[in-house]
Image (tube, grey):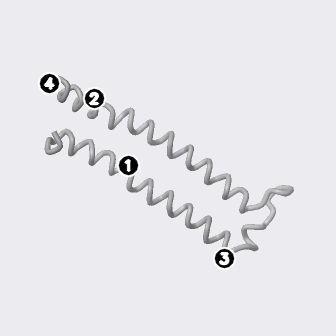
């Protein structure tokens, strides 16, 4: 089954989502860390009241994590699960 075109398509679809999303998230996180380390004045700029840019970036990390999770679930439901179900059915039917 691992050599089948269906499995190769499943892997391709997963990688087409996972690799770019991982790179984007790591770049976003690295930006946050670098700005926190080297742009202290910028990160400590107050936006509203006691809320500063650094706090907004930190909260943005949580928000982006939830966004990526939601996007992955949507992607998996539409693009991955139908092929995975087909592969599973073929394997279980072969027993």
Front-lying residue, 53 or 88: 88
Vertical position of residue 79 compared to residue 15: above or below: above
Q: Which of marks 4 and 2 is nearer the N terminus?
A: 2
Q: What element carries label 1?
A: helix
Residue at label 1?
Answer: 17
Q: Which of marks 3 and 4 is in front?
A: 4
Q: Distance between the residues labelled 4 and 2?
A: 16 Å
Residue tagged 4: 95
As drawn, the residue found furthest toward the front would be 95
Whether residue 24 sits left or right of residue 2 in the image: it is right
Quadrant, the N terminus: top left
Which of the two discs, 3 and 4, labels the residue nearer the N terminus? 3
Mark 4 vs mark 2, foreground winner is 4
The residue indicated by pointer 2 is: 85
Q: Are marks 1 and 2 in contact (CB under 8 Å)?
A: no
Whether residue 8 is situated above or below residue 56 in the rendered picture: above
Q: Residue drawn 28% across and 34% down?
A: 84
Residue ID for mark 3: 38
Q: Could you tell me residue 55's position as x and y percent?
A: 73, 58
């Amino acid at each position: 089954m691992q050599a089948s075109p269906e499995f190769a398509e499943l892997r391709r679809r997963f990688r087409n989502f996972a690799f770019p999303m991982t790179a984007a998230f790591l770049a976003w996180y690295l930006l946050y860390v670098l700005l926190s380390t080297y742009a202290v004045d910028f990160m400590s700029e107050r936006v509203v009241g006691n809320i500063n840019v650094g706090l907004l970036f930190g909260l943005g990390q949580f928000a982006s994590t939830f966004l990526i999770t939601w996007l992955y679930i949507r992607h998996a439901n539409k693009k991955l699960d139908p092929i995975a179900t087909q592969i599973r059915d073929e394997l279980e039917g072969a027993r």
